[in-house]
Image (spheres, coloured by chain):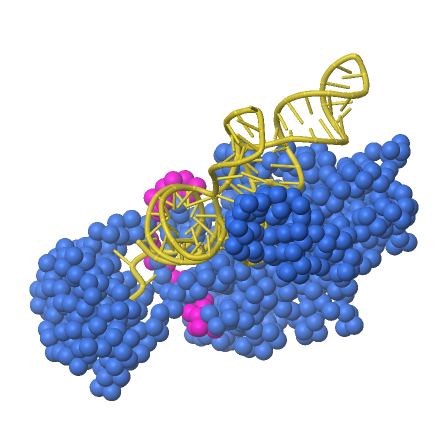
Chain colours: A blue, B yellow
RNA sequence: GCCGAUGUGGCGAAAUUGGCAGACGCACGUGACUCAAAAUCACGCGGAGCGAUCCGUGCCGGUUCGAGUCCGGCCAUCGGCACCA
């Protein structure tokens, strides 16, 4: 082996190439209609004070590999980056230290940017955006106004989580096990007037849209479950006592209208309006009131904690009439019926619903079997496949499916009910009583009501304030800025007040991928040309934790923008994949309190960005949670060092080239395919094997090295560029080169090794000329002397031959 | 409780989807180099046995010439949802 040229010094090489890419503006995307576009997206980070952690680069490196590969394949690639910078940590820091959140955010962004740049991602930094930039949130506000104008934003009284110690409203994510995440104080529900977005209007569209996109199945399933579509019927029961109100009708929602004959009582939720309307007719109103107060006091947490133990109170003096058979049944209230779903009232069929059964069992209510197949004295029979209707008049003898159809037709005809679809999806609570968010651009006028701020006056900027703490009543700190709050009505000019609530963190991230297409446009949120060229996003990778919030919210906004003609495709993302979490070395989730956090800077200091990137991709299956191993990362450094030292093994022997050709071709095929399937671990393993093979031979030709460098470049861009340049493998750098192709015919070797089995057990291995078919392989094996010896004296009963793999001889 | 995923060496994991289980890497062991160590290179590395062989992919059963992979029934771990009628 020749003397080594010089040592592998990642720090020098990486700084050098990062500068070259910057100076060259190598990854800036420009619209070019002669080229096919590829838009690759990763979730833009929240620039937290802790800096980057090793989880971020997993997603980023994966998409960087795809982006770099696409460029080599000739695509015009958009791979942008930005900052999701509104949010609670910056605000909490501001409250504590009386520093403007913008200041700390800017410092964090600077730190994150340095860290990301060190890793060598091929982001288009010229398109960097920041959700807290007024030039950005101007358009977030603009989209909100569109929603408002279309009636999709409305104000409603909804319960929020209120921390009794901090005296602040908390987001659901901040409530952990019923107490405040920060101070451990009790969290109670408090009704507040909030801006809501009518995402429920889009439930069906968001569900249908899933059919047209390539999301991994897990994501689709979670979104479907979250939207929670169910088909059933609304049925009107008459309540004679309520004749004067509601026309004496109480409507329920049920997915089992077929069991209508089995309804033995009704339950309304404690919040149901009918209770107050019937107050004079309810004989035990005091008891009912006490129960309602008890239910209201319970937090959501308590309600679910005691989910299995049913409670309730009968509405004495009130009965309902089952429309199908005229039977009078009692009416109860219980908190197992939710006011927010269906009609807030149910018909209880204890024989065929587990919750109703538990309730009936506890309070001694009658249980009538109407679907045969189980033992309703022991528990509810809920099977809908095999049962047959009984005790059900004209439904007797029908299957559940037939009975459903028949009863719905009957109800519809008589005007007693109709088919109904319900969704679990709730409207989106959109306001926060916080400072560090986009101001909601509305003005409340005593004469005109809520009025939009005119587009020409956007953005409504956040004013500078001193104190970021919410008021005692839980209002946003913006209420303490009278000169900002007091304004005039844009419609009538009368004195009016601005909305002081701000938007949630999800707002800015619901459309950022659109802004990336045209980030510096002052006149529109995106130009038609940019949007038509770049959208939709071809491939979006991100965490599973965003499946039901960010991913659903952004699909909602995009679909809305499509409906009003502002964007030209209905779905924003064609393909969505997810990465697994990186755990600490002890296999637990990385966290400061566990003391198992790995700082990427330390790793890069030791082994360089390339080895860090390679390790993040090699450590295990991309979609699974994997514990970090610094030793394992060092192994990847060793691999790159071995690649570096291939420079000492260069030769121009025809023979060496011949011998490596088949492996090189196989590696191109394997790596090309595995990168696409996000199977980075096996792609890198294949390159390692290829390098091991070269070491076994002791030399490599320029062409075979060239192929390896191209394949490895997306994962380890710096070292591969440097070797490429050192060895003058081309007059242009790799990032301006082309992805290697493979020669299918060169994949075939002269001979293949197959296994010879006797009765399913491997007895020996045999080299067989490749290209042999089934019969030829079989004959070849049976004529082999060693094989003959193995089956000597036995009767061959059957031979199974699989060309290129195996011959199994049954004796 | 419901939905989803996973279960393979000391560890992270592979296995062309029914065809040689453990590729690749970590850790470990032996040797070479070295005064020595580190680094590097070479070899070994599921278990039992000197051996030919036998056993082995969470457990029990089945289909098949052949099962990590398919079918039936369990167990365990992780993630999401959770009184949604």
Q: Nearer the viewer, residue A146 or A685?
A: A685
Magenta highlight on residue A305: no
Question: Horizontal and vertical percent for residue A424?
Answer: 37, 65
Q: Residue furthest bottom?
A: A413
Q: Nearer the viewer, residue A577 or A303?
A: A577
What is the magenta range? A177-205
Can residue A465 be seen?
Answer: no
Instruction: Kindly identify the residue that appears in the image at 14 percent across and 59 percent down.
Output: A377
Instruction: Kindly identify the residue that appears in the image at 85 percent across and 46 percent down.
Output: A656
Instruction: Kindly identify the residue that appears in the image at 83 percent across and 38 percent down.
Output: A698
Q: Quadrant of residue A790?
A: top right
Instruction: Kindly identify the residue that appears in the image at 53 percent across and 60 percent down.
Output: A216
Q: Nearer the viewer, residue B35 or A37?
A: B35
Question: Horizontal and vertical percent for residue A165?
Answer: 37, 42
Q: Nearer the viewer, residue A375 or A178?
A: A375
Q: Is residue A578 left or right of residue B35?
A: left
**Image quadrant containing the N terminus of chain A:** top right
């Amino acid at each position: 082996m020749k003397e080594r040229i010089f040592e592998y010094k990642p720090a020098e090489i990486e700084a050098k190439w990062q500068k070259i890419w910057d100076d060259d503006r190598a990854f800036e995307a420009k619209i070019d209609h002669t080229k096919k576009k590829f838009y690759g997206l990763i979730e833009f980070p929240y620039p937290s004070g802790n800096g980057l952690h090793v989880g971020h680069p997993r997603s980023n490196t994966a998409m960087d590999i795809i982006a770099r590969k696409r460029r080599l394949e000739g695509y015009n690639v958009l791979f942008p980056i930005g900052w999701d910078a509104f949010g609670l940590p910056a605000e909490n820091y501001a409250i504590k230290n009386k520093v403007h959140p913008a200041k700390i955010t800017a410092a964090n962004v600077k730190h994150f940017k340095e860290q990301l740049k060190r890793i060598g991602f091929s982001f288009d930094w010229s398109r960097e955006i920041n959700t807290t930039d007024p030039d950005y949130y101007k358009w977030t506000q603009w989209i909100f106004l569109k929603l408002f104008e279309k009636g999709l934003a409305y104000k409603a009284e909804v319960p929020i989580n209120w921390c009794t110690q901090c005296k602040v409203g908390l987001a659901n994510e901040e409530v952990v096990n019923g107490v405040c995440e920060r101070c451990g104080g009790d969290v109670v529900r408090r009704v507040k007037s909030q801006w809501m977005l009518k995402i429920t209007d889009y439930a069906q569209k968001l569900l249908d849209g899933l059919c047209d996109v390539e999301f991994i199945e897990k994501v689709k399933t979670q979104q479907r479950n979250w939207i929670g579509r169910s088909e059933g019927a609304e049925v009107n029961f008459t309540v004679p006592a309520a004749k004067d109100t509601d026309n004496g009708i109480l409507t329920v929602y049920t997915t089992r209208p077929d069991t209508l004959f089995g309804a033995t009582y009704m339950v309304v939720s404690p919040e149901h309006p009918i209770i107050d309307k019937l107050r004079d007719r309810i004989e035990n109103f005091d008891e009912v009131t006490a129960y309602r107060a008890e239910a209201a006091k319970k937090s959501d947490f308590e309600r679910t904690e005691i989910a299995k133990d049913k409670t309730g109170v009968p509405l004495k003096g009130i009965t309902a009439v089952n429309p199908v058979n005229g039977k009078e049944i009692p009416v109860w209230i219980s908190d197992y019926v939710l006011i927010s779903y269906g009609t807030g009232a149910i018909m209880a069929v204890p024989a065929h619903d587990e919750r109703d059964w538990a309730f009936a069992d506890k309070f001694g209510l009658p249980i009538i079997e109407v679907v045969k197949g189980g033992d309703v004295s022991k528990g509810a029979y809920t099977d809908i496949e095999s049962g047959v209707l009984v005790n059900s008049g004209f439904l007797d003898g029908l299957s559940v499916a037939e009975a459903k159809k028949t009863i719905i037709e009957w109800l519809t005809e008589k005007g007693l009910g109709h088919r109904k679809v319900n969704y679990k999806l709730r409207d989106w609570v959109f306001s926060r009583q916080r400072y560090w968010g986009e101001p909601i651009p509305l003005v409340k006028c005593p004469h005109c009501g809520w009025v939009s701020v005119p587009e020409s006056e956007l953005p409504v900027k956040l004013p500078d304030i001193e104190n970021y703490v919410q008021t005692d009543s839980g209002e946003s700190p913006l209420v303490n800025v009278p000169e900002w709050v007091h304004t005039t009505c844009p419609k009538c000019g009368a004195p009016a007040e601005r909305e002081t609530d701000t938007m949630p963190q999800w707002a800015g991230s619901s459309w950022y991928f659109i802004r990336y297409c045209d980030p510096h446009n002052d006149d529109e949120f995106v130009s038609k040309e940019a949007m038509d060229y770049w959208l939709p996003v071809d491939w979006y990778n991100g965490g599973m934790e965003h499946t039901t919030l960010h991913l659903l919210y952004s699909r909602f906004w995009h679909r809305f923008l499509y409906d009003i003609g502002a964007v030209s495709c209905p779905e924003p993302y064609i393909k969505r994949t997810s990465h697994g979490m990186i755990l600490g070395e002890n296999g637990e989730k990385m966290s400061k309190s566990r003391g198992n956090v790995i700082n990427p800077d330390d790793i890069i200091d030791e082994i360089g960005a390339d080895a860090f990137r390679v390790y993040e991709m090699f450590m295990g299956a991309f979609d699974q949670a994997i514990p970090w191993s610094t030793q394992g990362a060092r192994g990847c450094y060793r691999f790159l060092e071995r690649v570096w030292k291939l420079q000492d093994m260069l030769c121009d022997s025809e023979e060496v080239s011949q011998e490596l050709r088949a492996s090189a071709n196989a590696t191109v095929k394997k790596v090309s395919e595995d990168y696409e399937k996000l199977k980075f671990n096996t792609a890198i393993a294949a390159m390692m094997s290829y390098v091991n093979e070269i070491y076994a031979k002791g030399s490599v030709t320029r062409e075979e090295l060239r192929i390896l460098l191209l394949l490895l470049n997306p994962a380890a861009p710096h070292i591969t560029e440097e070797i490429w340049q050192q060895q003058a493998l081309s007059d242009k750098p790799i990032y301006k080169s082309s992805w290697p192709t493979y020669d299918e015919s060169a994949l075939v070797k002269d001979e293949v090794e197959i296994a010879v089995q006797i009765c399913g057990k491997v007895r020996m291995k045999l080299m067989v000329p490749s290209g042999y078919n089934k019969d030829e392989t079989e004959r070849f094996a049976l004529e082999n002397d060693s094989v003959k010896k193995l089956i000597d004296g036995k009767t061959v009963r059957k031979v199974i031959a699989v060309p290129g793999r195996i011959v199994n001889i049954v004796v």
